[in-house]
């Protein structure tokens, strides 16, 4: 379906191994050490942000649309690529005059922006880690 937020799931094996084994404390570069700890925290924030957007879709967007719109007409732009619209008589524009739809959409967009910001933060941390390891 078109309303799939995607996800960001990098491998954490190396950092987890460093932290769990206690070898991270052997790093002399305190900035790098702090950045690696921040990386883990920021990665959790990214997962939470994407999960919140996905929950909004699953718990509110899809239930609302299934009552007020033909999902087939949305899916034609997604993985299913339906060639024809639904045969049901539906006022497709009515949702744009419904405060519930507006509020669901507004909150979803807020969550998408929050996910984007968390990705930008972790991107800066990745750049800083790379900068510290280029020496």
Image (cartoon, rainbow, N blue to C red):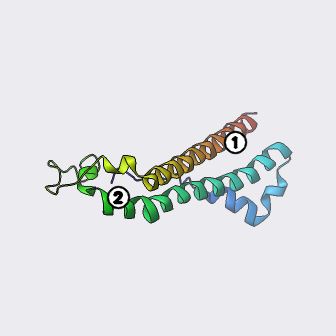
Binning the other alpha carbons within 10 Å of mark 1 as few (below 14), some (14 to 19) or many (20 upward) gives some
Q: Secondary structure at mark 2?
A: helix
Nearer to us in this view, 1 or 95:
95
Nearer to us in this view, 125 or 105:
105
- Residue underneath mark 1: 125
Asked whether the viewer can see residue 29, the reply is no
Specify the quadrant of the image occupied by residue 131: top right
Binning the other alpha carbons within 10 Å of mark 2 as few (below 14), some (14 to 19) or many (20 upward) gives some
Label 2, label 1: how far apart the Cα atoms are: 38 Å
Q: Is residue 114 left or right of residue 53?
A: right
Expressed as whole percent of the image width and height from the top left, the position of residue 126 reads 66, 41
- Please give the name of the residue rendered at 62% of the width and 43% of the height, measured from the top-left corner: 117
- Residue underneath mark 2: 65
Asked whether the viewer can see residue 92, the reply is yes
Expressed as whole percent of the image width and height from the top left, the position of residue 28 reads 86, 47
First along the sequence among labels 2 and 1 = 2
Expressed as whole percent of the image width and height from the top left, the position of residue 22 reads 80, 63
- Please give the name of the residue rendered at 73% of the width and 59% of the height, measured from the top-left corner: 18
Q: Which mark is residue 85?
A: none
Specify the quadrant of the image occupied by residue 62: bottom left
Q: Is residue 27 left or right of residue 97?
A: right
Q: Secondary structure at mark 1?
A: helix
- Between label 2 and label 1, give the one nearer the viewer: 2
């Amino acid at each position: 379906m078109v309303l799939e937020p995607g996800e960001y799931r990098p491998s954490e094996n190396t950092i987890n191994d460093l932290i769990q084994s206690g070898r991270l404390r052997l790093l002399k570069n305190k900035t790098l050490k702090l950045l690696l700890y921040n990386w883990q925290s920021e990665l959790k924030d990214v997962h939470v942000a994407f999960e919140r957007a996905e929950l909004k879709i699953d718990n509110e967007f899809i239930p609302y649309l299934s009552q007020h719109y033909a999902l087939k007409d949305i899916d034609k732009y997604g993985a299913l690529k339906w060639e024809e619209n639904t045969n049901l008589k539906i006022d497709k524009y009515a949702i744009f005059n419904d405060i519930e739809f507006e509020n669901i959409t507004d909150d979803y967009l807020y969550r998408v922006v929050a996910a984007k910001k968390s990705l930008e933060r972790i991107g800066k941390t990745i750049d800083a880690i790379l900068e510290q390891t280029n020496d």
